[in-house]
Amino acid sequence: MKLKLLIVLLALPLSACNTLRGTGDLGVVIERATGSLQVVDSTQRVSLSQVNGLGDLSHASIVYSRDERFAYVFGRDGGLTKVDILKGEITKRIIQSGNSIGGAISQDGKLVSVSNYTPGGVNVFNAETLALVESIPAIYGKDNKQSKVVGLVDAPGQRFVFSLYDAGEIWIADFNHVNNNGKAAITKFKNIGKQPYDGLITPDGRYYIAGLFGEDGLAVLDLWHPEKGVKRILANYGRGGKKMPVYKMPHLEGWAMTEDYAFFPAVGRNEVLVMNRRNWKQVKKIAVHGQPVFVMARPDGRQVWVNYAYPKNDTVEVIDTESLKIIKTLKPGKAVLHMEFTPRGEQVWISARDAGKVTVYDTATFKALTTLPMAKPSGIFFTNRAHRIGL
């Protein structure tokens, strides 16, 4: 009896010191000026910890492990960093290229891929150890040139899809099917348009869409039927023949997809374009405050939130997806760079880089709930992305 009591007493301090918690309401905010990130709690609306030593985060993005515990940070300096958000510390960091521009995690969560400018191509790593699994150089043309890679996303079937900026191509790397050398099977689609600058995949994983900077239109690949090749849509989308100044390229990953419509930021124009998702035909142009960067749908699809490029980057507008009209204008601060909805959409977190803060808004009342000071905050990434295709 005394022995049992002693065991219980010895166990009490241990259990009291180890607080268990889930990760479903956590996320990270990139602090680009200091090469750090802050781990945040979206329920309490507070910062939990800061992680330093992440390198150049001037164009950083993040994907999560399936269990939502580890964030894989893709830095502009070619760094790939695995961060334990529960412990608030770096698990492993490698420099895998000279200049990278985002990444993706495979359907089964076992592979992490990075798209690179220098040297152009995609590197694929073991998600557990960050050991290199395969390198895919983006070599094209008769002269075997190497292209910058953009628009890298994960797709169903253990595939990665990406665009070659210099080559005007879209490639699929299929890790469920390997060739005689044990490498992923690569399917190449050529002549898809000039200078694809980014890409997205629809939430159901069916369509990969590449935006074109060098000419009008978008390139669409049906991943259910890749044998049908790439088709062009929205002929008046893009920079076009009239070379308008583009202050910041729109981010395609944030394009809003609702049940009926797709909302696109017009390149170099003060417009949001609305397209019917059934036939990819344009429905409407919505005049907006400036050149859109992110056009993002609230999770229920009832609203679309839009932020803008310099010099009008202190503003966010909200579009009602039923009336297709602007219903609210907000001023979160100078240089709004990113917006992120909580998983069910009751809040939106907005970073204002030059104001040095992240503001949390109620999406029903549009009231500011909390302001968190941060060092030049940019990207905001919540852990529910771990279970969404293409994010």
Image: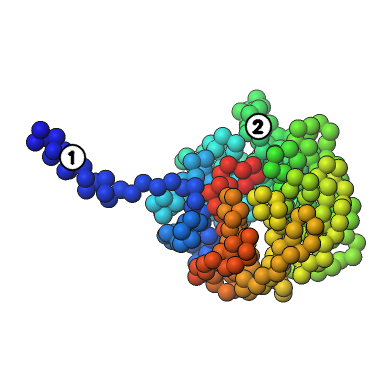
Tell me if residue 82 can be seen: no
Q: Distance between the residues labelled 1 and 2?
A: 49 Å
Name the amino acid type tagged 1: Val
Q: Quadrant of the N terminus?
A: top left
Name the amino acid type tagged 2: Gly
Q: Please give the count of numbered marks on the rendered protein.
A: 2
- In the picture, measured across the screen, residue 298 lies left or right of residue 132, that is right
Q: Residue at x 54, y 61 (%)?
A: 30
Q: In which quarter of the image is residue 208?
A: top right
Q: Write down the residue under mark 1.
A: 8
Tell me if residue 388 can be seen: yes
Q: Which residue is drawn at 86% across and 42% down?
A: 279
- In the picture, measured across the screen, residue 180 lies left or right of residue 250, that is left
Q: Determine the secondary structure under disc 1.
A: helix
Q: Where is residue 72 in the image (x, y as percent from the top left)?
A: 52, 49
The color scheme shown is rainbow
Q: In this orientation, which residue lies closer to the viewer: 62 or 176?
A: 62
Compared with residue 211, is residue 158 higher up or lower down, i.e. above or below?
Answer: above
Q: Write down the residue under mark 2.
A: 157
Compared with residue 36, is residue 142 higher up or lower down, i.e. above or below?
Answer: above
- Mark 1 nearby-residue class (10 Å; few <14, some 14–19, many ≥20): few
Mark 1 touches mark 2? (CB < 8 Å) = no
- Mark 2 nearby-residue class (10 Å; few <14, some 14–19, many ≥20): some
